[in-house]
Structure formats: structure tokens, C-alpha cells
Amino acid sequence: MIHETIAQNLAQFVVPMLRRPAHLQTAALCLRQKGKRREVLVITSRGTGRWILPKGWPMKGKTLAEAAAREAWEEAGVRGYVSAEPVGSYFGRKMTDGGLGLRCQVYVYRVDVTGIDDDFKEAGQRRRKWVTPSRAAKMVQEPDLKALLRAI
């Protein structure tokens, strides 16, 4: 009992000191209209092959919205109009080359797709798939991103 109380008191002070603020990333919510159906573009990550939105780190000299549009092009070959304000955000993990998982807050910007090319920077390294928002929500892993996609 006394050891349990000491451990709880210690955790109360030590755990907050070990937490670091989340790293910042930006993502592109690429949308298109296919007849009466709205579709979202999901892509695979290069490392694990899990389904994600095109995303990356902030870029010097670019707004987060501009960086999201750039990631959409580099990772998926998408061109389009990007919203200036995020449609939401979610928390996720970015695996580093050394295997360390960084906690990231990812701000999501809507990109209304005007074109998609097959020749882009990461072509051949990722798969792309157009799906309904509800299907995309089932494919991604992050709970907050699932909720964001369901709300579309």
C-alpha cells in the first residue's frame, strides 16, 4: 500500500516532465466528386504500407496549407485548390528511420482536386485509392482522423 502511494505520487510529478509537446505535421484531405459520390484519396505509407492521407512536415517559406498541397503532389500526384484554414486535426505517430515513434499533431487541409498525374515524385513507392469518406474512415488507424473522415 505504501509503495503504491509512493509510486502514484512519483508518477504525478515525473510523467509530466517526460512528456514533450507533439511535433507538427500537415496533411492533405484530397476530395473529388464522382457523379453524386464524394471521394477521398488515401495513400499507403512507405514504411508500413498502412493507409494514410498525404502528409509531411512544415516547409520553410510555405504556409501549412501550401505544405499540405505540396505533400499531395509529391506523395500522390494531386493538383488542386487548397483551403487556407484546416478542416481539423488529429494526433498520430510518425515512425523515424531509427524506429522511434514521434507523437505528432497533424493539421488537415482540404484540397479540391483539379487533376491527378501518374508521374510524381513518390510514384512507385505508394499506392493510391479513391474511396468514400466512410470507407476511408475504416481504412485509417488514427481515431481522430476516423472521426474527421466520418464527418465529411
Image (cartoon, rainbow, N blue to C red):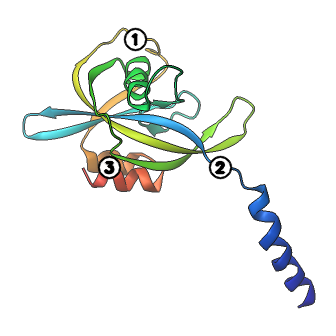
Q: Position of 80 compared to 64: left or right?
A: left
In-front residue for pair 112/65: 65
Q: Estimate the x, y position of residue 7 in percent, counting from the top left.
A: 86, 77
Residue underneath mark 2: 21
**Residue kind at label 2, given as amino acid type:** Pro
Count neighbours of disc 3 (C-alpha within 10 A) and say few if under 14, some if 14 to 19, many if 20 or more: many
Q: Position of 63 compared to 87: left or right?
A: right
Is residue 70 positioned above or below 32 on the image? above
Q: Are marks 1 and 3 in contact (CB under 8 Å)?
A: no
Count neighbours of disc 1 (C-alpha within 10 A) and say few if under 14, some if 14 to 19, many if 20 or more: some
Q: Estimate the x, y position of residue 122 in percent, counting from the top left.
A: 47, 16
Q: Position of 14 compared to 83: left or right?
A: right
Q: Estimate the x, y position of residue 94 in percent, counting from the top left.
A: 60, 39
Query: Image quadrant of residue 83?
Result: top left
Q: Position of 130 compared to 119: left or right?
A: left
- Where residue 31 is drawn, which disc sits there? none
Mark positioned earlier in the residue sequence (1 or 3): 1
The extreme front residue here reads 61
Q: CA distance from mark 2 to mark 1?
A: 33 Å
The extreme left residue here reads 35
Residue underneath mark 3: 149
Residue underneath mark 1: 120
Q: CA distance from mark 1 to mark 3?
A: 25 Å
In-front residue for pair 133/72: 72
Q: Nearer the viewer, mark 2 or mark 3?
A: 2
